Amino acid sequence: MKVNVEVECSPEEARRFLGLPDVTRANEAYVDALTNAMQGTTNFDQLNELTKQVAPMGQMGLKLFQQFLENGVAMAMSGTGTKPKKGE
């Protein structure tokens, strides 16, 4: 038997329901610091050095994040939230 449940809620409602902490202020501070740091970069080498300094897991973290974004875009472009199973 297969059961699907769809819940329509905002990200804020989902965060509260799941009991996750509100990291809005921390995220804003991180984005502001990153934006300010990037304003001084004028070439690829400077940008590469900057990413090594600010990325939590360095190069590996950036590759994982890039893969996460690419998978999200691929799912959004396909119009489904999951990959179709073989034969569907």
Image (tube, rainbow, N blue to C red):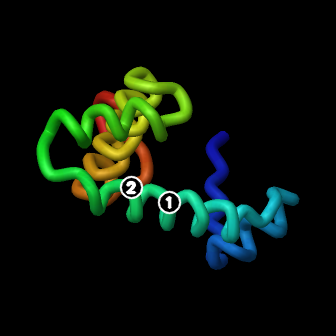
Whether residue 20 sits left or right of residue 72 in the image: it is: right
For residue 7, what is the image quadrant?
bottom right
Q: Which residue is found at the position 69% from the left and 69% from the top?
A: 25
Mark 1–mark 2 contact, CB under 8 Å?
yes
Question: Above or below — where is 8 with respect to 86?
Answer: below
Where in the figure is residue 54, as x and y percent of width and height?
48, 40
Image side of residue 11 versus residue 42, left or right: right
* Residue identifier under label 2: 37
Is residue 84 shown to the viewer in this render? Answer: no
Q: Is residue 58 visible?
A: yes
Residue 42: which numbered mark, if any?
Answer: none
Q: Is residue 39 above or below residue 41?
A: below
Residue at (46% x, 29% y) in the render = 61
Real-space CA distance between mark 1 and mark 2, rounded to the nearest whole angstrom: 6 Å
Q: Give the position of the N terminus as an image quadrant.
A: top right
Give x and y (percent) for residue 37. 39, 55
Q: Mark 1 falls on what kind of element?
A: helix
As shown in the figure, which amino acid type bears the numbered disc 1? Answer: Ala
Q: In the image, residue 36 lies at what x, y percent?
A: 40, 63
* 74 on left or right of 35: left
Front residue (pair 7, 11): 11
Q: Nearer the viewer, residue 54 or 40?
A: 40
Q: The residue under label 2 is which amino acid type? A: Ala
Q: Quadrant of the C terminus?
A: top left
> Which sits in the foreground, 42 or 57?
42
Image location (x, y in percent) of residue 20: 81, 57
Image point (23%, 39%), residue name: 46
Which residue lies under the disc numbered 1?
Answer: 33
- The quadrant in which residue 14 appears is bottom right
Residue under the point 26% across and 47% down: 74
